[in-house]
Image (cartoon, rainbow, N blue to C red):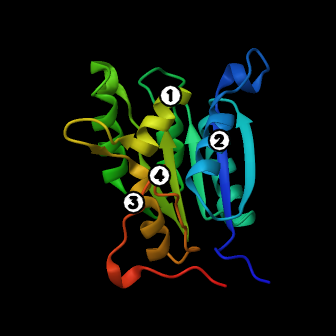
């Protein structure tokens, strides 16, 4: 019997000199896995790694995840501030076929509800081949807020993940089905699909 939803391969890349050296435990990847496991109804195959803040190393890891491991979605965490070692956006842009500026704009709008320093964030999203790559913040709480949004705010603020499934549809990836109680994906009616089986 076939699975009711498409299987999805998700790459997770935590960028941190100290976490990659074992100075402290990485919290970004566990936070991403926990949120995505709640939000998606698809079977997920993970490809996760923790690497240092090195532009060439980040770019190489992104290329490997997309071109060789065939991830449909890659989420990075860390390295998006203004400090000299923060080079995740530069590495992401270096491997991009298309830039998707709306994701970064919305992440900063969400974070500005909490801290004025949100304007220092340089998070971006890009498309490489048939994969969406998104730079996320480094803190677990901020990761959840940017993905999920602020549904109880007045007015409610949509999270970025609501747009991710339709974006992946448009670039030729699998059909992502979300749990609406965590994050309701938005698609035009013409793009909706029923579960198999």
Say which residue label 4 marks: 181
Residue drawn 53% across and 26% down? 139
Packing grade of label 2 (10 A; few <14, some 14-19, many >=20) is: few
Packing grade of label 4 (10 A; few <14, some 14-19, many >=20) is: few
Q: Which mark is residue 34?
A: 2
Mark toward the start of the polypeptide (4 vs 2): 2
Q: CA distance from mark 2 to mark 1?
A: 12 Å
Say which residue label 3 marks: 163
Horizontal and vertical percent for residue 14?
Answer: 65, 36
**Element assignment for label 4:** loop
Horizontal and vertical percent for residue 150?
Answer: 34, 38
Looking at the picture, tell me which residue is in the foreground, 67 or 177: 177
**Element assignment for label 2:** helix
Say which residue label 1 marks: 141
**Element assignment for label 1:** helix
Q: CA distance from mark 1 to mark 3?
A: 20 Å
Location of residue 138 with respect to 150 vertically, above or below: above
- Judge depth for marks 3 and 2 and give the one in front: 2
Packing grade of label 1 (10 A; few <14, some 14-19, many >=20) is: few
Q: Quadrant of the C terminus?
A: bottom right
């Amino acid at each position: 019997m076939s699975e009711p939803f498409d299987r999805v391969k998700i790459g997770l890349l935590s960028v941190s000199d100290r976490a990659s050296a074992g100075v402290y435990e990485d919290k970004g990847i566990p936070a991403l896995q926990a949120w995505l496991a709640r939000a998606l109804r698809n079977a997920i195959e993970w490809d996760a790694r923790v690497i240092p803040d090195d532009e060439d190393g980040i770019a190489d890891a992104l290329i490997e995840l997309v071109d060789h491991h065939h991830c449909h979605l890659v989420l990075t965490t860390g390295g998006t501030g203004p400090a000299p070692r923060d080079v995740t956006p530069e590495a992401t842009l270096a491997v991009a076929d298309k830039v998707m500026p709306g994701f970064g704009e919305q992440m900063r709008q969400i974070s500005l509800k909490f801290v004025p320093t949100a304007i220092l964030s340089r998070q971006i999203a890009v498309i490489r081949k048939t994969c969406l790559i998104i730079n996320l913040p480094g803190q677990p709480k901020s990761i959840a807020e940017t993905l999920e949004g602020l549904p109880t705010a007045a007015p409610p603020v949509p999270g970025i993940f609501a747009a991710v499934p339709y974006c992946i549809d448009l670039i030729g990836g699998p059909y992502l089905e979300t749990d609406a109680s965590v994050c309701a994906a938005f698609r035009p009616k013409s793009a909706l699909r029923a579960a198999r089986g």
